[in-house]
Image (spheres, grey):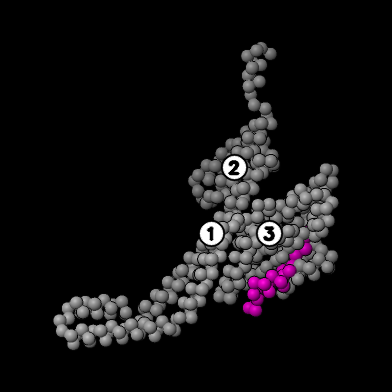
Amino acid sequence: MNSKNKRKELSAPPLAFSQLIANLLVSCINGLIKGLPKDDSFGKKLKELEGVVRKGVHITPATGLAKEIEEYFDRLATHQKFLKDEKEIVITMVREIAETIGVMVSSSTGLEGDIGQCVKNLEQADNIKDILQLRDTFVEEIQKVREHSLTLKDELEAHRKQSTVLAEKLEESQAQALVDPLTNALNRAAYNLKMGQMINEFKRYKESWAILVLDIDNFKKFNDTYGHLMGDKVLKSVSGTVRDSIRISDQIFRYGGEEFVVFLSRVDKKIATQLAEKICRQVENDYFVDGDRKLKVTISIGGAIVSEEDTESSLFERADKAMYRAKNNGRNQVIMDL
């Protein structure tokens, strides 16, 4: 080999380094794409770039920094989707209040036009008799609005209280992280906010939904045997498996420790049970590698369909008790409180 070729070989980056850079680039591209609309032109260009990278270099499953990049974009996407959902709820509430006020004004015998005419007539009046007469007409119109407003007082007050509470909760949620940093699931603060909204929406629109309480079986024993680092891997993997098993309209929250909660929107008893069974079987089919051993993890699930009598605490309690019945019956199963 001549000295020129030798220098060229030494200056070329090793294959492993090229793969590392390619993996990092693909993780960044995929993360950026997640935050863009499906038909976004820039997103299409990024997808084409990803294809070029994959043709040039073999891409391996993300690890290390590439994995951290993917998890960062996952957290960002989860956070933004949750806030978008809450914003839509606020917008709907504002529109309903506006419609209520519109009904009040439109049913007040043309108040706006009458007031405008009263002002015009007052400007043209040139004697005390006309002014007093116009004053009486104006007072009568205001009285009509006052009487009509009393019939809407309760509804408007309910709107005011609900919007005040929602604003306080939204402000509180902004001050806290909405996403659990370990599992990339929504956290307890997000759960508390969403649970109240789901209960209120059911009482208003009567659209059925379900709550699932999930608990990893024998997690303490697993942690004590294999260590907390492996325990963290289990939590992350279970969360990811559940997230991949549910629909885009559903949400997963890390309630605490090894316990998760899932909200299933627009489901009846049959569909809720089927989705819960699907989650349970998907987790059962996964395994974890520790040296030369394959470690399997299972979960127990309790579920409940919301009812007219439910409060935030009573609904969770029903699902939680069902989950403990699943534990006592042998674990790795679903029990629904229907």
The residues bearing labels 2 and 3 have C-alpha atoms spaced at a distance of 26 Å
Residue 31 horizontal side relative to residue 240, left or right: left
The numbered mark, 3 or 1, whose residue comes first in the sequence reads 1
Identify the residue position indicated by label 3 in the image: 254
- Could you tell me how far apart the alpha carbons at marks 1 and 2 are, in whole angstroms? 23 Å
Magenta-tinted stretch? 298-320
Name which of mark 2 and mark 3 comes first in the sequence.
2
How far across and down, in percent of the image, does residue 281 sit?
76, 59
In the image, 271: left or right of 327? left
Q: Position of residue 298 (x, y in %)?
A: 79, 58
Which disc number belongs to residue 28? 2
Between 198 and 244, the one nearer to me in the picture = 198
Tag 1 residue: 84
Residue 299 magenta: yes
Proximity of marks 1 and 2: CB atoms separated by less than 8 Å: no
Kind of residue sitting beneath label 1: Lys
- Classify 329 as above or below 31: below
Badge 1 or badge 2: first in the primary sequence:
2
